[in-house]
Image (cartoon, grey):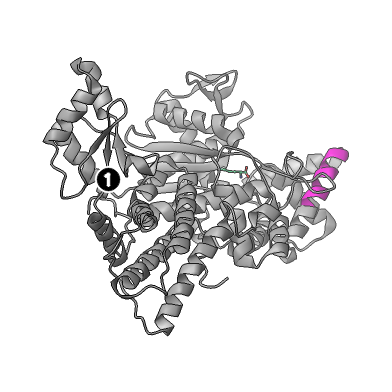
Amino acid sequence: MSSLPSLLSERIQAVAGVDPELRPATKPQFGHYQSNVALRLAKSEGRPPREVAASIVERLQIDDLCEPPEIAGPGFINLRLKTTVLAGAVDGLLADPHTGIAQTDRPQTVVIDYSAPNVAKQMHVGHLRTTIIGDCFNRVLTALGHRVIPQNHIGDWGTQFGMLVEETLDEGIDASALTLAEAEDLYKRGSKHFREDEEFATRARKRVVALQSGDEQTRKIWRDLVAVSLVGFNATYARLNVKLTDDDLAGESTYNDDLASVAAELEANGTAVIDDGALCVFVEGFNAPMIVRKSDGGYGYSITDLAAVRHRIRDLHANRLIYVTDVRQADHFAQVFAVCRKAGWLPDDAAAEHVGYGMVLGPDGKPYKTRDGKAMLLADLLDMAEEKAAPPIALAAIKYADLSNGLNKDYVFDVDRMVQTTGNTGPYLQYAHARMSQVLRKAEAEGLGSPETVTVLDEPAEQTVALLLSRYGEVVDEVAQTLQPHRLCAYLYDLAVAVSTFYEQCPVLKSAGAVRNSRLALCRAVKQVLASGLDLLGIEALDRM
Ligand code: ARG
């Protein structure tokens, strides 16, 4: 099923010869959709834009969909959908198991790299953002019919494990019995020990070698530390109600066996060269080369990401790679992608996108820290929100605050504002949904049945709601393309505002006959779209509040 704007676009294109670049009208008096095609054509045709517009409108065959088109201002073409067409669109949505989200005819395999906390460290505010944003992308792309493969690239490898294991042995601790918080304390004691005791530092460095060469006692403690950390991460995922599971784990260590072949392949195909003893890749546009292998033979963070790209394209057959991390890693990923393109591991038809997010700020507008100056833990934020509201509402508040601004912007964690049920908040959307549920519940209780067709749309407030509903599928498409969830948030907020105007101006249960049935069907469609949209944001749609 084509969406209404794509149908309209096709019709205009048939007479204008070019894409009309149809946009939702900016004001109700301009109708529902607008095109500036005449202004664009006027230049090349050397005719006044209004004249061009008139000749397009004259030849346009659109009266099955629209009221007679209007030419406005310098030559805009304004279209107003017929109410019967709008009603039909809402009915279609009600009957559609996908609620108007058109299933893609070109399904892709999309790898999304998100969350990725570090072993023996609790998740902090930054992990809140990547986890929520990645989960939203997962839901949106899956809803459109793509195959999504989440990859949780946890930090489970590196030199820090030398001191972690050595400290565990020194203290005679059973690592398998630790909680994640205790493992983090161990990490802190180990780091201090490493800084202050040269003899310990030497043992810790040797321990790194033992870990790499597979020494069983060392590996066992490493595995225990990973396992206890996963228990902690999974508890947070459950609390956040995100879709990540152990099946999505692909930590840094999973690429260990690939690193030598990554280096060898890069060297063999001439992508990498030895420079001052180190294996490096020079790509244009970056200040420094990427160091694939250090001169002492050690591997760093970068090569693991090269191995991951190669694996995701070659073995997972991904068409699109998405990485959700802090904006500060933007350069790192740009360079990883450039190196992989150069190596031929990232073909031209495979997209690679880094989505950077900004910082979570405290009430003072500075990066959110605890009183003693430490990074705020994710669990602390959840606790703070749950002091103000029930868990599903607190979570809605946090997720919506995180997703409703441009992702790369910082935002202030203002818990009192976020949990309000008025204004542009998650709980406000949940409230709009609960209100629709309540109306439908009452209708059912009063024996009014559950009508599923919209037949009357005489009131402007009803029309506004119907028009917004008919746009839902387009908005979801846009989020999938642009990776900007704030567009869906803004849409759902507009819908909730339009619904509240409708609710004030158009009695539902107190009306009668065909009007009441039609309004009940409209409420049902609103509820369906809000439920679907909230689900894509990872927010629970509540039936009562
Ligand atoms: N573990 C890293 C961190 O906490 C993020 C890893 C992101 N993903 C990747 N493929 N490098 O900052």
Is residue 67 rendered to the left or right of residue 285? left
Is residue 182 rendered to the left or right of residue 514? right
Residue type, label 1? Arg
Query: Residue at the spot x=35%, y=49% of the render?
Result: 109
Q: Quadrant of ligand 1?
A: top right
Residue 194 magenta-drawn?
yes
Residue 94 lies, with reference to residue 412, above or below; the image says below
User: Where in the figure is residue 60, as x and y percent of width and height?
Assistant: 14, 37
Query: Residue at the spot x=64%, y=66% of the render?
Result: 391
* Quarter of the figure with residue 30: top left
Disc 1, SS = loop
- Does the Cβ of the disc 1 residue fall within 8 Å of ligand 1? no
Q: Which residues are magenta?
A: 186-198
Q: Quadrant of the N terminus?
A: bottom left
User: Where in the figure is residue 481, as x and y percent of width and height?
Assistant: 38, 42
Residue tagged by mark 1?
Answer: 80
Q: Mark 1 Cα within 10 Å, few/some/many (few <14, many 20+)?
A: some
Q: Residue lying farthest right?
A: 196
User: Where in the figure is residue 206, as x and y percent of width and height?
Assistant: 73, 42
Instruction: Depth check: give the residue in front, 226 or 348.
Output: 348
Query: Residue at the spot x=57%, y=19% of the render?
Result: 287
User: Where in the figure is residue 69, as x and y percent of width and height?
Assistant: 22, 39
Is residue 167 rendered to the left or right of residue 507? right
The answer to whether residue 24 is seen in the rendering is no
Instruction: Depth check: give the residue in front, 316 or 132.
Output: 132
Instruction: Depth check: give the residue in front, 312 or 92.
Output: 92
Residue 218 magenta-drawn?
no
Q: Main secondary structure of the magenta part?
A: helix
* Quarter of the figure with residue 465: bottom left
Is residue 179 rendered to the left or right of residue 535? right
Residue 221 lies, with reference to residue 277, above or below; the image says below
Instruction: Depth check: give the residue in front, 391 or 376.
Output: 391
